[in-house]
Amino acid sequence: MTQYRVLPGPEHFLPPAAASMGIYLPNPGEAHINGVIVPEEKAYEEAARQFLMAQVPTIFPGPLVLWAWNEKAAKKAAAVRKLYEILKECVQPGQKPMLIPMPDYRPKYPKINPEVEINPNHPNLTIWHNKIDCCMFIGVHCHQANLSLKIIRGGTSCYTVAMCAQAGHEDAMLSFRDASVEKILKLGEWIRKLKGTVKPRLTTAKTSASN
Amino acid sequence: MAEIKSHIGTQNKKGQTYTDAWEMMHEAPRNPSFYTGSEVIKEALRRASCDVMIAYPITPQSEAAALIGELFAEGYIGDYFRGESEFAVMSQCAGAAFGGARVFTTTAGPGTMRAMENFPMWAGARLPIQMIVTCRGINSPLSIQPDTIEISYLLNTGMLVWHAETAQDFFDWILKGFMVSEEPEVHLPLALCCDGFFVTHTKDVVNLTPADMCLPPYDPYRSPVPCMDMECPPVRMMRDPFIMKSNYISYATHASWQQEIWAAVERSRKHTIKWINGLIDTENTDAEVVIVASGTAVSQGREAIRLLEDEGVRCGLVKVKSLRPWPGEEIREATKNAKHIFVPEFNVTGWLAKEIKATIPNSERVHAGPHVCGGMTMPPEIIASEIKAALGLRSESLAGRGS
Amino acid sequence: MSKERIKISPDLYDIMPSDYQDLVQSATYGKEDRGWKDIGTSKELIEQHSLCAGCPESMAFRYILASLPNPEDTVMVGSTGCTSLVFPMVAVHNIHSLFGNQNAIASGLKRALSVRFPDRVKDVVVLAGDGATVDIGLDMTLQAWFRQEKFTTICFDNELYANTGGQESGLMQKGFVAKMAPVGKLFDKVRLPEIARESGCHYVVNCTVSKPSLVEKVIRNSVLIAREIGPTYIQLYTPCILEIGKNSMEGLQEMRDSEKPTERFAYKEYVSEPAKQFLAELAAKDKERKAAAKQLAGKA
């Protein structure tokens, strides 16, 4: 059994891929938290808690939901929007939920505008600029999601969640698999359920841990 | 694009039924048939729902590549043609895979080397192409004879690399290989290697699955990267853009990309273990002497073990089936009791022994050999003799008749 | 992809960057007679790129992308070079894999798309530089033509290796002094248009990109002929102003100078017999369509 755990960074100059550290992906019906396999139900609760705890909880929808390339994609997009609305309803004053797209994967030079988008080649710029401390990827192709998740873990302290339509992501701190409209909405229900029970980290000064 | 739907239970234009792959490989009745390795490749492809196969002549894979052409003429393969060189063929395979096809090809020896630039590109582009490598010599002077040296060049390309011992392995692993390499979290090319001639040109009894069953088709929309067919987002998409502006961020992206390739190799472990029943096979690994081998060296090792048994020497066997992913933990466990580990190989450098030495504790236990190369056979007697010599037992000279 | 599929999910439309909102609103995907005149009145299929200011290659890219008859069902294949700095910004799926293998990639791609979409039009267009087309990739360029692969090959001929810093290429003029040609290039510019004709191309054009209307006609013809009949080859002069010592505003004049009747980029065209017949049929249909439209307009 590996001792490695997938935790918020900044982890390393070049953090390893979690898969290379012995972290396995969950099987259907399961999820993982920090690289440990858990029943999916537990992951909903933890993801909701992380969102409600964060100062800037953010959803990053990717091309697979941003574009209405089939009916299912458009329905998932509606669910993502709903989740964002729920998040806005459930946070406390001082918390600032965001919805920022990853519209494509191309390297943009000299750099992207971090206020309006996130890019897998330098996702840390968007995290830093908006002071995002918890984020969820959804609808991003798995390869590009993993690039992003590793770079974020390497250089930021952001908590990462993956709502993946395929087998999940070890490089996120928490990952669902086989994402569907129902699962997105179920996460919304959990956020509603935990509303008011989670104390947000509303600090303006830097914590000593990030020095 | 149409909504993703299951094809299981429906028929293709040849009247074959798309069958759940696990059911087809593990539960369907098997029919024993007497075939050459090349014919077995053809029979596997008949059942593989392959969209595109691209061929080029080079011994000893030419026969298999030509037989698949017959399958195309019969309507079992979507498209088939002869490319102009292995470099071009591997790029044509890439083009077809970028376009969302299930792609198959075969090559050997100098052809593998000529095509080499393509393989890290395939892996980096996450193209689940399957390539049969019927190994032969590569250095000058030219040799068409079996020699596994080319496998060592494939080990660091990011491809999955399996090494078949028999025609039966070949039949099963071609079909199972598509299932492993097409998993969305794996989605890497597979080099399915065998020792040329020994496997391709000898006849063996092979248990085939029913010819009226075939694998479900490949679904390119589960790919971890966008398929290049203008049917899926994002519309502004290049496979794969350069990330080489001189700054730290670009380097980090490329580094992360490389790590992702090897992470995908790691993720294939779970699926490979499931489909080919473990990365290694073991027999009697409680013995003090263990042979670890891959390909036909396993068969020769098995014979040597029989010879040694007759002389009262007990010897275990580890058959390495997958080289990438590398069965490090499995080999450590299987050799933990061994005082002597012999690694017979059909190549001059002993790449398998080097990999094993880098994996296990107390690597001085590894005897790298015996080695043969350039098409020489490896009589079981020379393996037995080398083992006996190491154990301090007397053995006859096998080099010739003496003066 | 049908034009309707290039659509942003309504629930997330407001958060998409404006260049994508513009793309779905006013790009000319699916427009029957799209062409260079759409430039300026519609969203182009090319976003901000990093080519040098005034690079004729960027003009060529804009005209070509405006002229593709069927961009919503076109996949492009590039190769290593300056073009690959532009391709990520192009709103048509495109592939770069290795240097020089573009016609091999396109061969596999076209066949895969034909297997997967037997009843649909899927155009494949190769666009690569002269080093990729004529030097390192010549084998695969020619072999694709020998096999009569049904796609278009466009060569951006800047007569040198621009992206690596101005080295000698096969399409460079004899005598030109460049890196790796320290005493001047010792052999003639390779005559690829003639080789293309002999290799089985059905439509071959050699010209510059000084006239957008001409580029539009040539690109449209080459894609339609490749779709229906067989391989086509277009060689376009896109001078590297940087490497031939010109200023940003001098690219257009350089092309005009090079297309004079006695110069190496004087307009040359070859059309095979089947392609001629096809173009005649196309023209007749076009005429019929226009007449019908006129009649309809008259009635209204």
Image (cartoon, coloured by chain):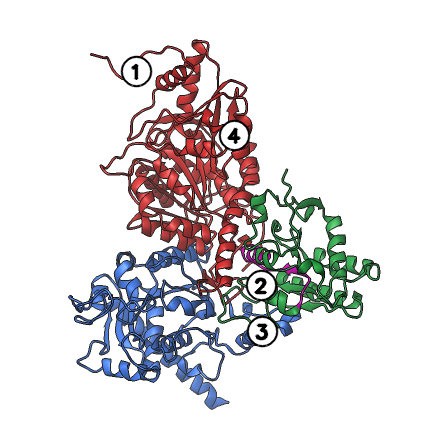
The residue type indicated by label 4 comes to Pro
Which is more foreground, mark 4 or mark 2? Answer: 4
Classify mark 2: residues with Cα within 10 Å, few (<14), some (14-19) or many (20+).
Answer: many
Magenta-highlighted residues:
A131-149
The local secondary structure at tag 1 comes to loop
Which is more foreground, mark 3 or mark 1? Answer: 1
Tell me whether marks 4 and 1 sit on the same chain.
yes
The local secondary structure at tag 3 comes to loop
**Chain depicted in blue:** C
Tell me whether marks 3 and 1 sit on the same chain.
no
Q: Residue at x 47, y 48 (%)?
A: B128
Say which quadrant the N terminus of chain A sits in: top right
Tell me whether marks 4 and 2 sit on the same chain.
no
Q: Colour of chain B?
A: red
Q: In the rendering, which numbered label is found on residue B22?
A: none
The residue type indicated by label 2 comes to Pro
The residue type indicated by label 1 comes to Leu
Which is more foreground, mark 4 or mark 3? Answer: 4
> In the figure, B197 relative to A21: above or below?
above
Q: Colour of chain A?
A: green
Dot 4 corresponds to which residue? B361
Q: Marks 4 and 1, how far apart in space? A: 32 Å
Whether pointer 3 and pointer 1 mark residues with C-beta atoms closer than 8 Å, the reply is no
Q: Position of residue C190 (x, y in %)?
A: 20, 66
Q: Position of residue B105 (x, y in %)?
A: 38, 44
Q: Residue at x 70, y 63 (%)?
A: A79
Whether pointer 1 and pointer 2 mark residues with C-beta atoms closer than 8 Å, the reply is no
Which is more foreground, mark 4 or mark 1? Answer: 4
Chain letter of mark 3 equals: C
> In the figure, C266 relative to A44: above or below?
below
Dot 2 corresponds to which residue? A123
Chain letter of mark 2 equals: A
